[in-house]
Amino acid sequence: MGSKTLVYKQKVNGNLTEASKHLERLSNAITELKRVYSFPLKAADYKQLVLDVQSLAFSDQVIYRFSKLQDCMGAKLFKSLLLYQGENVNKPFLDILNQLEKMEVIDVDEWFEIRDLRNEIAPDYEDKDDVAVNLLNSIDRLRSELTRILDDIRVMIE
């Protein structure tokens, strides 16, 4: 294994570790919320959730960690994986996503759903209960796909 390949593998491993940390903390926060609230979360439950400081903190943690996870995967992990695989990453992001789809790492349409959900977080969601409920439910639903992507990347670099 050449020194360049080893450097790229270390970069993938570092990005994978970062992404895994975000996913683990996101999952832990959802687990804590599920101890009290049923998912998919209903609007009435969310109204109760925001009144409980600890539940609200877990809710914010889910949304924050999802945002950080999506950023890490999209901005760092995917590119480092392609570099490790010997691919050129000096191309439009859509081309990078298409290459990852050919490698069966992601489904481009599903990744756009994940990205769009992350973009919903950017505006202030706190005064819009329906948006917050949708975010939490969607993140919970997409968590298994994010886990699968990270697991598949882990297997690819072993």
Image: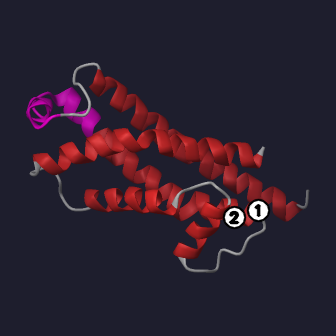
103 sits left or right of 110 in the view: right
Query: Residue 67, position in %: x, y?
Result: 38, 53
Q: CA distance from mark 2 to mark 1?
A: 5 Å
Magenta segment: 42-59
Name the residue rendered at 75%, 48% in the picture. 157
Q: Is residue 35 above or below residue 130?
A: above
Name the residue rendered at 40%, 37% in the picture. 26
Query: Residue 3, position in %: x, y?
Result: 87, 61
Q: Is residue 20 above or below residue 10?
A: above
- Residue that extends furthest to the right in the rendered view of this protein: 1
Q: Which residue is label 2 attached to?
A: 82
Q: Quadrant of residue 76?
A: bottom right
Residues marked 2 and 1 touching at CB (< 8 Å): yes
Q: Which residue is label 1 attached to?
A: 85
Label 2 element class: helix
Q: Residues within 10 Å of mark 1 (few under 14, many from 20)?
A: some
Q: In the image, is residue 56 part of the stretch drawn in magenta? A: yes
Q: In the image, is residue 37 part of the stretch drawn in magenta? A: no
